[in-house]
Image (spheres, helix red, strand yellow):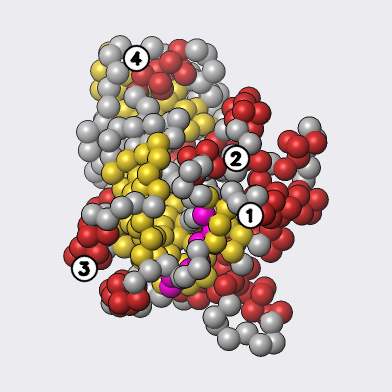
Amino acid sequence: MPKIIPFKAVKPTRAIVGLVASRPYQSYTLDERESRMAYNPYSFLHVINPGYKYAQEVTGQERYKLVRNRYLEFKEDGVFVQDEKPSFYVYKIVNRQGQEFCGIIAATSAEDYEKNIIKKHEDTIAQREETFKSYLQNVGFNAEPVLLTYPDNSVIAEIINETQKTHAEFEFTMTYRDTHYLWKVDDEDTIATIQKEFSKMETVYIADGHHRSSSSYLLYKDEKAKNPNHNGSESYNYFMSYLIPESDLVIHEFNRLIKDLNGLSKEEFLIKLDAFYRIENRGIMPYNPSKPHHFSMYLDGEFYSLYLRKTSYDFKTALDKLDAQLLYKTILQPILGIEDLRHDNRISYVNGKHEMITIKSSVDSGEFKVGFGMCPSNVEQMKQIADEGLTMPPKSTYILPKLRSAITIYEY
């Protein structure tokens, strides 16, 4: 049922792709961005941060125009070259921990997003959707694919494996020590087989990139409404995605740090916790939870284990079973008074790739009063929540792989 099509990607040349590709703009500190731009004229950061050329911050429509100009300059200078034939792209990432992720970059249907064939599990913010939609309309390209996941499929897996036996178009390692490989798939029979296998699936799921998906859908709606000759083949009907099998997806948790106890003493806080949890003091050594509905807590120099009392909480939906939701409903909201997980400045998040010692250090520094650790959710939980039309709380999952920008670019 999901519709995917090949497209003519705009790509860096093989010789400089490792210099062009970048992490998402927000992931760099100001010093990191300026250092990379000062010493690397090919970095895609020059395109998306065009004010650097004039040592001036630019925003809004002015920035969009300059981004478009820089992008066209990169094409004119031969940094970017567009493929002549529509293709799928087999893309593999091997990160610094040795984890491998391999899937297919393709154009996916905005109409499938509208029909809930492409399913989501996170809420989006309307202002961010509109901002990125306006960005896409003005710059005319998207350089970072949405991460989608699909049920493991032996036919697609065989095609991917056979493709990897051929010479890769790209093979490069970034300074972050992640290695990237890209193969072009332009054989018409192979493309048709891939499309046929995806058409047999009921749904695919957004793993990462909810705002990019929703903004692309809004762009599709706008452009379709403005085009009296709309026929469904226009580029705005699709958006670029990286589709990987569910078995390749890696999900980490986000642990929580809270700045205060909402006016409670340590003893009062523990008494309120006791209504929901069996509490055990684990001492000064870092302690990790071992199963769902089981949390670790660091408070006042000591670790605690929190085991949910089975009679204290009702599991009615897939969302209720999610540990991030459970922590919110039993501790963060009723005891610590945190209503808005996205905007309350009393809460911060640490992705689960970091050890519990990070929680300890943050609390010991005095910046935070208490920290909570949890087990990661899994793909099945994510799918069940999406299937029930529900959405996870903010910062419920930290999902790998994290994608680079400008390895393939989709033009509108």
6 within the magenta span: yes
Instruction: Give the vertical position of 352 relative to 192 (above or below).
Output: above
SS assignment at label 2: loop
72 within the magenta span: no
Q: Position of residue 159 (x, y in %)?
A: 24, 64
Say few, some or many: other residues with alpha carbon within 10 Å of mark 3 (under 14 / 14 to 19 / 20 or more): few
Amino acid type of the residue that numbered disc 1 sits on in the rendered structure: Lys
Q: Which tag, 1 or 3, sits closer to the chain's start?
A: 1
3D distance between C-alphas at marks 3 and 2 = 38 Å
Instruction: Give the vertical position of 331 relative to 314 (above or below).
Output: above
Say few, some or many: other residues with alpha carbon within 10 Å of mark 4 (under 14 / 14 to 19 / 20 or more): some
- The residue that label 4 is drawn on is 302
Mark nearest the camera among 1 and 3 is 1
SS assignment at label 4: strand
Front residue of 137/409: it is 409
- The residue that label 1 is drawn on is 75
3D distance between C-alphas at marks 3 and 4 = 52 Å
3D distance between C-alphas at marks 4 and 2 = 49 Å
Front residue of 216/386: it is 216
Residues in magenta, as a range:
5-11
Q: Is residue 122 at least partly visible in the picture?
A: no
Q: Which tag, 4 or 2, sits closer to the chain's start?
A: 2
- The residue that label 2 is drawn on is 42
Q: Is residue 153 left or right of residue 82?
A: left
> Which residue is located at x 51 percent, y 31 percent?
348
Amino acid type of the residue that numbered disc 4 sits on in the rendered structure: Glu
Q: Position of residue 48 (x, y in %)?
A: 66, 45
Say few, some or many: other residues with alpha carbon within 10 Å of mark 2 (under 14 / 14 to 19 / 20 or more): some
Front residue of 319/206: it is 206
Q: Which tag, 3 or 2, sits closer to the chain's start?
A: 2
